[in-house]
Amino acid sequence: MRHLLAKLPKVDKVLQEDSIQKWQHKLDTSYIKETIQNEIDQIRQGILEGELTDESIANYDCILENINKSLENRVASSLKPVINATGTVLHTNLGRALLSQEVINSIIELGPSYSNLEYDLEAGKRGSRYVHLKDVLKQITGAEDALVVNNNAAAVLLMLSALTDGKEVLISRGELVEIGGAFRIPEVITRGGAILHEVGATNKTHLKDYAEGINEETGALLRVHTSNYHLVGFTEKVDDRELVDLAHENGLLALNDLGSGLFLDMQRFGLPYEPTVQEAIDAGFDVVTFSGDKLLGGPQAGIIVGKKALLDKMRSHPLTRALRTDKVTLMALEVTMRQYLNPELALEKIPVLQMISQSREELDQKARELSDRIQTIGKQWSVEVIVGESQIGGGSFPGATLPTSLVQIAHHSISAAQIEMYLRSLAKPIIARVHQDAVQFDVRTLRNDDIDQIVEALVEIE
Ligand SMILES: *Cc1c(COP(=O)(O)O)cnc(C)c1O
């Protein structure tokens, strides 16, 4: 043990190595020293605890290589691109919606430049960051006014805080949704300073339940779209228009959290009916909130549309400043929203819509290309193209799936679990599905050169 310890290098000696010196232009010397020290300490610890006994452990070149790896990790971003081969379009853990090329181009132009973010170019004085998206959102949704905040959770919180503080908010027991990450509608209502007043039953809520619940303390009727779960069987919910009319007849606000906002009907792509933002505005809701990065396929944002007087109230609420979006988000959202001005263009350009609307032929062709190329790698692989199902994800279209093509691979001597782990450990990780003892790639979510990269990764496996 002692002779191993004696072989461990001194920090200053390692620091002088050319391969270490080259990090000087990216890392301060103190970070480099600390990394070297940590690496050597770890080995010393291992030796003292009797875990590391092999001679090679003190090999100078090995130690140097490990230190270089640690330094590289220190410089490289922890947040990095991955290949999504799961087929789940709005994979929450993998960053939800991808941005379109047009959005990227606009960010590249805006990033290193000043902008008219809060400057009125016509008047030559201070303007508002909220004007840029207003007109396009009004045009698409038919609403009087529009406002954008950090995400839809923030939009709901702001809506309730600004409009229903101290009042009762009536909501159906069937709509007390948990969105995930501890975001539950009942708690948001309470946080916003309102009093939660549940009506109806979990499976059935009638108009008379709302009507009977209304009292002097009531401020609003709230509809929360149950975007992430499905009630089936003996169920009933009140029609949007009836709910809105009841609210207005009683001088109350009709509010709607739509969750995953949708501008285009997706039924023609084989998905079930989901209400669109335009329908919610048409039904007469005073304020409607939805996400920018679920089905709309833009950046993370919360979009609020509705009556101007109410949105003005929200704009002047102190929370608005705390929940505001930054210029990169606003730019990305504006470009995405403008793509909706031509729905056919939106389907072609916005990655989320493009992935959902891919035809069976396109999917099959992509799967054949991938499978053919894996086949040419060698006999160690067995490959087949099979029919499968993709989920939409992001808590939207619960239970619904789209038929897809899967490339299913198995190796003659390496388990699917090991292959999956290897793919996950790459510089650009590949996230695949594992089914029984096969790895599956759902081609629906594969982009541009993903196929090349998957093939390159598999070639490395003997
Ligand atoms: C997703 C969702 C939210 C939260 O939206 P984020 O953009 O994720 O903050 C709120 N309400 C409903 C009904 C949702 O589906």
Image (spheres, rainbow, N blue to C red):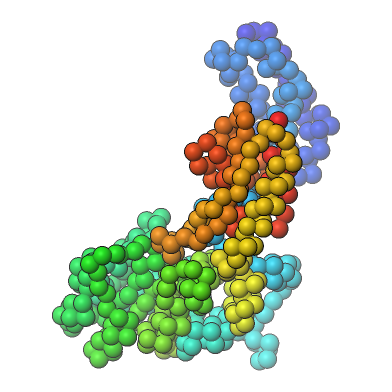
Q: Position of residue 276 (x, y in %)?
A: 45, 78
Quarter of the figure that contains the C terminus = top right
In the displayed structure, would residue 316 be above or below residue 122? above
Can residue 25 be seen here? The reply is yes
Can residue 131 be seen here? The reply is no
In the displayed structure, would residue 118 be above or below residue 107? below
Q: Position of residue 244 (x, y in %)?
A: 31, 85
Q: Position of residue 152 (x, y in %)?
A: 45, 69
Query: Image check: 456 left or right of 130?
Result: right
Closer to us: 122 or 407? 407
Number of numbered discs present? 0
* Rendering quarter of residue 181: bottom left
Closer to us: 44 or 410? 410
Residue under the point 37% across and 86% down: 283
Closer to us: 378 or 198? 378
Residue under the point 27% across and 74% down: 237
Outermost right residue: 18
Query: Image check: 250 left or right of 320?
Result: left
Residue under the point 73% across and 17% down: 59
Residue under the point 72% across and 24% down: 63
* Rendering quarter of residue 204: bottom left
In the displayed structure, would residue 231 be above or below residue 51? below
Q: Position of residue 347 (x, y in %)?
A: 61, 73
Quarter of the figure that contains the N terminus = top right
* Rendering quarter of residue 12: top right
Query: Image check: 134 left or right of 452?
Result: left
